[in-house]
Image (cartoon, grey):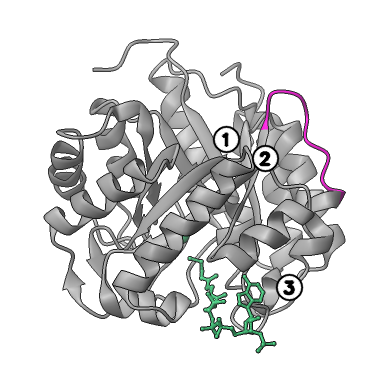
Amino acid sequence: MITASEQVRITDVGPRDGLQSQKTLVPTAGKLALIEALWSAGVPAIEATSFVSPQAVPQMADADELMPAITVPAGRSLSALVPNQRGLERAVRAGCREVAVVLSATETMNQRNIRMGLAEAIATARDTLRDAQAQGLATRAYIAVAFACPFEGHTPTERVHALSTAMAEAGAGEIVVADTIGAAAPSDVQRVLQTLLQSLPAQSLGLHLHNTRGMALANAWQGLQMGVRRFDASIGGLGGCPFAPGAAGNLATEDLALLCAQAGLETQIRMDALVRAIDVAETLVGYPLGGCSLRWIRQNKEMSI
Ligand code: COA
Ligand code: ZN
């Protein structure tokens, strides 16, 4: 059920998930320009970077410099992904007040992504969440490959349920159910959410969707209808995961913001300024970006939504 004027919180993960797979290094100043453009468009939350191994993801090697250089407008939130306690320490030192831990739902994906088996990954996520909360940080926990894994195929719903409740019990403020390779259809989102909602309130759930099969927006709509009000999206659909073969771009922020606006849901995002952020992102990566709705938005960006 959707009631008009309800708030939907969109976290733009473009500077992290969007840029991490770019081969050409984007300078810190360029990342700052993108983040500034996103704030100017009213985006309420940004995942700016990740404090991961610079060998694993060279594009995120400037996290320690980038994070303290970002000015956060009042009422907005800035977060970073941390794979372990070392990442959390770096994030705290850089002034970060919200972190996301990452746990994949399959053994192989954990190995490929963070070089740990599932059991070790659960323990690491728990320890990192505990330490983050002890320091007063807000937390999110990604459950990656929650629908399908590029190495193991279909992900069992019960596994996603068990990992999500484990992360909620470990204190994660938000459980982000991630379709890392964009394999889900709305029927899959319905199946997984139905199971999760047996144990977890809709307010604690977020969806992180990729558009590999063109279904990200339909999947977001399914989530909205089931009460989810937190979504990750990426400016211009920028994205992909270097460790998950076949992962294409994220759900585009402009498509989700437009969907919400047309459904009467409040996102605080201004379309005219969001188009400028897409222009900045295009300059950084050097090729055209944009979700399904961009052409229409460019022609109608003065609309009041
Ligand atoms: N930040 C920076 N360096 C880190 C680190 C962190 N969070 N965690 C570990 N390291 C360093 C270690 O200090 C060590 O450095 P050294 O070789 O100079 O001694 C090196 O990385 C290896 O440490 P180890 O614990 O053996 O890590 P690993 O090689 O098994 O890698 C991760 C584990 C988690 C650090 C790495 O796989 C990673 O960063 N993955 C992130 C992947 C990602 O971002 N995926 C996309 C987002 S979901
Ligand atoms: Zn992603």
Discs 2, 1 touching: Cβ within 8 Å: yes
Give the SS element for disc 3.
Answer: loop
- Between 301 and 273, the one lying in front of the other is 273
Q: Residue at x 60, y 22 (%)?
A: 268
Residue at point 68%, 78% (across, down)? 54
Tell me if I can see residue 166 in this picture. Answer: yes
Q: Position of residue 119 (x, y in %)?
A: 30, 71
Q: Residue at x 47, y 19 (%)?
A: 7
Find residue 64 and report its horizontal and vertical position in percent: 79, 63
Q: Which mark is first along the chain, 1 or 3?
A: 3
Residue at the spot of label 1: 297
State the residue position of label 2.
275
Within the magenta stretch, is there residue 97?
Answer: no
Amino acid type of the residue that numbered disc 2 sits on in the rendered structure: Val
Residue 178, image quadrant: bottom left
As helix, strand or loop, the secondary structure at mark 2 comes to: helix
Please check the rendered image and state whether residue 70 is part of the magenta-colored stretch, yes or no. yes
Question: In the rendered structure, which disc, 3 or 2, sits on the residue that comes first in sequence?
Answer: 3
- Establish if 295 lies above or below 245: above
Residue span colored magenta: 69-76
Q: Quadrant of ligand 2?
A: bottom left
Residue closer to the observer: 166 or 257: 166
Look at mark 3 in the image and give the residue it sits on.
61
**What secondary structure prevails in the magenta region?**
loop
